[in-house]
Structures are given as structure tokens and as C-alpha cells.
Image: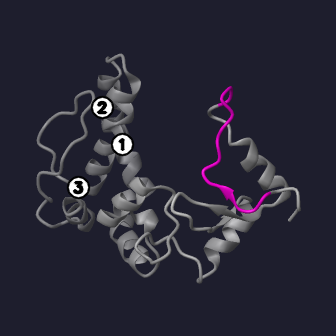
Amino acid sequence: MTDALPDPVTFPMPRATDRPFDPSPELTRRSAEAPVSRVRLWDGTTPWLVTRYDDVRAVLADPRAGVDVAEPGFPHTNAVSKARDARMKTLMQMDAPEHTAHRRLLTADFMIRKMEALRPRIQRIVDDLLAGSDLVRTVALPVPAWTWKTASGATIGVRPRPGWSPPVTSPPGGTSASAACASNTG
């Protein structure tokens, strides 16, 4: 690491106002000059920031590191995410063996063969929704929800419409473990 970088820097780092979709200039600089460094979060904690792909893979492969948001000391980026994560946890926020067990439940429902079989139905849903004018409201929200619900075998009693994501009304007779899992997430 270089002495030119103050350590730790506040995270998240501000983005350039003229390039709001680019990474922060400070993050870009750290990736080049100090790819593993400390940052200061909103609550005063100072976790490590790892910015390069190979380094991130090495950290994630190390059993001492984890992504479980329920673990004491997990570095939440803000108070809202900490409060949300206290109430619910996604598959991407679980470590083994919990992650492995949930992944096994979902694997069969999301095989390439099954997804390919759903392609015509999903295409019809997308075509119908594209008749609307707001791409996010008409497609980006309902299509992933409908795809997941359809793939998992969940029962959905109404047709998709713009701006709506379907609730699971009931699992299909317990034949799909992921549908049962989905019905318990609400």
C-alpha cells in the first residue's frame, strides 16, 4: 500500500457528479494503488475493502470470511441495510451450510433445461408488458418475479400487469421444495 492514501477513508465514497454511473474516483485509485485497505463505515467500524477480482475470490474462498449478515461484526454499509438484514436474509447473504441447503432446494427448479422450456411463456409475458411505456414498471419489476414464481412452481392466480409483482397464493401441493420455500419468505 502507498502512504499517499489516507486510511481509512469513508465508505461509500462519493461519485463524480458528472459521471454518476462510474465508480468513485477514490475507489478507482484505491483499486490501482491499495487494493486491500481499511474503510470507515457509517457506524464508525473499519472493515477491509478488497477491490480486485482475484483478491475478492481469494477472500470468498477463505473459510474465515463470510457473507452472513446475521454474524456479529458484519459490515453493513448503512443503518437501513442493517435494519433490513435483521428482518430477512437472502441466499446471497448466507454462508455454508445454510446457503448449501437452500441452494439444493432451488437447483432443480432453475436448471437450464427447465428455463429453456419456460422461454415461450416468459416471451409472451414480456411482449404483453412491453405494450406499456415505462420499461422498469412494465418489465423490470414483474418479469423477474413472474419468472421466479413460474420456475419454482408457485401458484399464481392472476395475470401479470405493469408495476405489479405476483404474490405466492399457495405452494403447489408441496411438490416443489422451492415453492414451499418461496411461500415462507413473505
Q: Quadrant of the C terminus?
A: bottom left
Q: Position of residue 49 (x, y in %)?
A: 67, 63
Going by the numbered disc 1, the residue's amino acid type is Pro
Taking the spot 36% from the left edge, 42% from the top edge, the residue there is 144
Q: Are marks 2 and 3 in contact (CB under 8 Å)?
A: no
Q: Residue at x 37, y 21 (%)?
A: 134
Callouts 1 and 2 close, C-beta under 8 Å: no
Mark 3–mark 1 Cα distance, whole angstroms, equals: 14 Å
Real-space CA distance between mark 2 and mark 3, rounded to the nearest whole angstrom: 17 Å
Q: Secondary structure at mark 2?
A: helix
The x, y position of residue 52, in whole percent, is 74, 59
Q: Is residue 18 above or below residue 42?
A: above
Range of residues picked out in magenta: 6-19
Please say whether residue 9 is one of the residues in the magenta stretch. yes
Which residue bears the numbered disc 2? 125
Give the residue pinned by disc 1. 144
Residue bearing the label numbered 3: 153
Using the rendered view, name the quadrant where residue 57 is placed: bottom right
Residue that appears at 46% across and 79% down: 96
Give the residue type at disc 3: Gly
Verify whether residue 18 appears in magenta.
yes
Label 3 crowd (10 A; few <14 / some 14-19 / many >=20)? many
Location of residue 145 in the rendering, given as x and y in whole percent from the top left corner = 31, 44
Name the quadrant containing residue 55.
Answer: bottom right
Question: Which quadrant does the N terminus fall into?
Answer: bottom right
The chief SS type of the magenta part is loop
* Helix, strand or loop for disc 1: helix
| Mark closer to the observer (3, 1) | 1
Q: Is residue 161 left or right of residue 18?
A: left
Dot 1: few (<14), some (14–19), or many (≥20) neighbours within 10 Å?
few
Residue 151 horizontal side relative to residue 60, left or right? left
At mark 3, the secondary structure is loop
